[in-house]
Image (cartoon, rainbow, N blue to C red):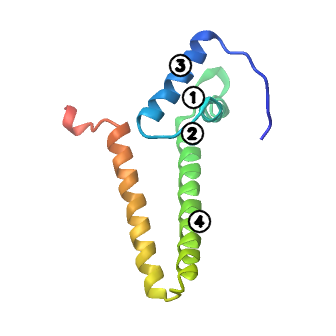
Amino acid sequence: MTRRNIYFKEKTEREVLELVQIEIQNGATHGDVNFSSVVNELVNIGLMVKKHQGEGNSFDQEGFNKDLMRKVSGTREGISIMMAMLSEMYLHSRGENSNEKLEELLDRNLSGMSSAEDRAETKHFVDKESHE
């Protein structure tokens, strides 16, 4: 990672610090989230928005959504691959090299990941049907 010294307006700094505090209150550790990680995430989002901002400052929502879906699905796929590798390594270290044990552990882990995604969705998004 490259290190850059940049200056922030006080209001911007306060808002970033508030985002960090919200994540910590939601269970993140200082190792999971910090000022630098939040700013990096916001800059990445801003760059995606800027990339899809065409001439005349109109926003290409469809292109943005496609980019976002590509990044999210790629991240999920990468996490699934890492989870499979770690599960296999875990079972191998315990001397349990059967395919049945691996399938069982992977099923449990992937189900846990899907449940975590569902919980995050209900935590971060408002259900339109319940507000109509």
Q: In which quadrant will I find the C terminus?
A: top left
SS assignment at label 3: helix
Q: Which residue is drawn at 53% across and 73% down?
A: 87
Given contact means CB atoms under 8 Å apart, are the residues at marks 2 and 1 in contact? yes
Residue at image mark 1 = 59
Whole-angstrom CA distance, mark 3 to mark 4, is: 33 Å
Q: Residue at x 43, y 75 (%)?
A: 105
Q: In which quadrant will I find the N terminus?
A: top right
Q: Nearer the viewer, residue 45 or 34?
A: 34
Q: Where is residue 108 in the image (x, y as percent from the top left)?
A: 39, 70
Callout 4: few (<14), some (14-19), or many (20+) C-alpha neighbours within 10 Å?
few
Given contact means CB atoms under 8 Å apart, are the residues at marks 1 and 3 in contact? no
Placement of 89 over or under 69, stated as above or below:
below
Tell me which numbered mark, 3 or 4, is placed earlier along the sequence: 3
Q: Position of residue 91 (x, y in %)?
A: 52, 79
Placement of 82 over or under 122, stated as above or below:
below
SS assignment at label 1: loop
Whole-angstrom CA distance, mark 4 to mark 2, is: 27 Å
Q: Which of 32 and 113 is in front in this view?
A: 32
Residue at image mark 3 = 15
Mark 1 residue type: Phe
Residue at image mark 2 = 64
Which numbered disc, 2 or 3, marks the residue closer to the eye? 3
Given contact means CB atoms under 8 Å apart, are the residues at marks 1 and 4 in contact? no
Mark 2 residue type: Phe
